[in-house]
Image: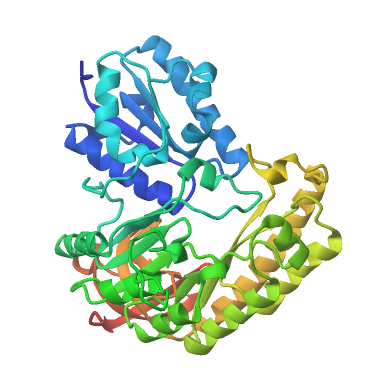
Amino acid sequence: MLPTPRRYHIVTFGCQMNKADSERMAGILDGMGFEWEENPELANVVLYNTCTIRDNAEQKVYSYLGRQAKRKHQDPSLTLVVAGCVAQQEGEQLLRRVPELDLVMGPHHANRLQDLLEQVFAGDQVVATEPIHIMEDITKPRRDSAVTAWVNVIYGCNERCTYCVVPNVRGLEQSRSPEAIRAEMETLSRQGYREVTLLGQNIDAYGRDLPGSTPEGRHLHTLTDLLYFVHDVPGIDRLRFATSHPRYFTDRLIRACGELPKVCEHFHIPFQSGNNEILKAMGRGYSQERYRQIIDKVRHYIPDAAISADAIVGFPGETEAQFNDTLRLVEDIGFDQVNTAAYSPRPQTPAATWGDQLSEEVKADRLQRLNHLVNTKVAERSQRYGDRIEEILVEEVNPKNPQQVMGRTRSNRLTFFEGDIQQLQGQTIAVKIQQVRPFSLTGTAVGFTVGV
């Protein structure tokens, strides 16, 4: 029996893939006649889309779940769902830990949410974590933005980084067909979206699993081929893609990004460590020298490109000298942003079993020192925007100042300026930058620009 009233709330942890999955699940709930509820305490379906990449994200989920589990004792009509990577990793063990749960579902089952909830409403407690082939995306996501949209192009990851739980919880790579991706983008364009970010856990691996190759042995379908294939979708003015792996960031891909005017000058290429021994222990498959070559080549073809990255400190066995190699890489390259984290042992990963784990104190100290350097370098990189005219795609009103709108430069820098959101949303505006901060800019509109 379906609950009445029918209100849902989704809490999303973790990466862009999870955000895209949450939008799809919200679209399914909308289609079932549920309404979004801002306050989880008033919703009668509460869904946690979880992340297990680090321990603190996982513990936060259990904290939230504990509160809702208590509420369920007072209100048995509450439906509690855990989706995503913690659900996939823990499976039925989650039910033993939180027996109040109604549905545990791995990320591959996001499109099956309606079927699974109908089983729950019929009185079952459901666990859906078995491997399945991900069907083409026929759901209509409830997208968080009216201007920018995620489009999944590849699910899963075949890499075996020794610290990473993603292949265990998101499975092997499954690429969508180029035709399905283009069709989704054409639909988005008709709905008024102007920017698309192509998403994959390891997006540069796109197409390796699709049938077909040339007599020379080259795959017919690569990320580069996909960019050429979807580049001319009318109405989509900007293209981004994430997340990249240095091992597959090819010269051909870099040249294509320089040639294709819709591809934005921002690349997220994690390096994880600046030391070759640690990179080898991580199973990353490249050296710090190779990483530097990639960045040099990107900046050769796209001189103003913004580069963001991910880094891990305190990996098992990391010495002070090896950590200093990471600091040196950050100092030399000058990133526009680095997502940093202290190493966190994850279940069923090789590195979690190694004996040379570092203390939390050492990890915290190194993280603090790396963050200090990152913030210094980011502030330096930001200075180049001063007095420039940047193209800003207007997304939303500034929540802290209703007189201002906000959007992003092509290089992904958040920018604020005075304007009316009703007139400007979805427009690309030329903005003269007058105030520079490490992670955002403020300026004055000087005119409209036309799409590519």
Q: Is residue 437 visible?
A: no
Q: Quadrant of the N terminus?
A: top left
Splitting the image into 4 quarters, where does residue 409 fall? Answer: bottom left
In this image, 149 relative to 295: left or right?
Answer: left
In this image, 20 relative to 266: left or right?
Answer: left
Q: Percent x, y for residue 198?
A: 36, 63
In this image, 450 relative to 387: left or right?
Answer: left
Q: State the residue at coordinates (24%, 35%).
A: 29
Question: Which residue is more in the foreground, 234 or 278?
Answer: 278
Q: Percent x, y for residue 255?
A: 44, 84
Splitting the image into 4 quarters, where does residue 424 fall? Answer: bottom left
Q: Residue furthest front?
A: 215
Q: Is residue 21 visible?
A: yes
In this image, 253 relative to 79: left or right?
Answer: right
Q: Percent x, y for residue 23?
A: 31, 46
Q: State the residue at coordinates (71%, 46%).
A: 351
Q: State the residue at coordinates (72%, 61%).
A: 280
Q: Establish if 226 lies above or below 304.
A: above
Question: Which residue is more in the foreground, 174 or 218?
Answer: 218
Q: Quadrant of the C terminus?
A: bottom left
Question: Which residue is more in the foreground, 222 or 241?
Answer: 222
Count the labels in the image.
0
* Figure coloring: rainbow
Q: Establish if 389 lies above or below 245.
A: below
Q: Percent x, y for residue 328?
A: 75, 73
Q: Residue furthest left?
A: 190
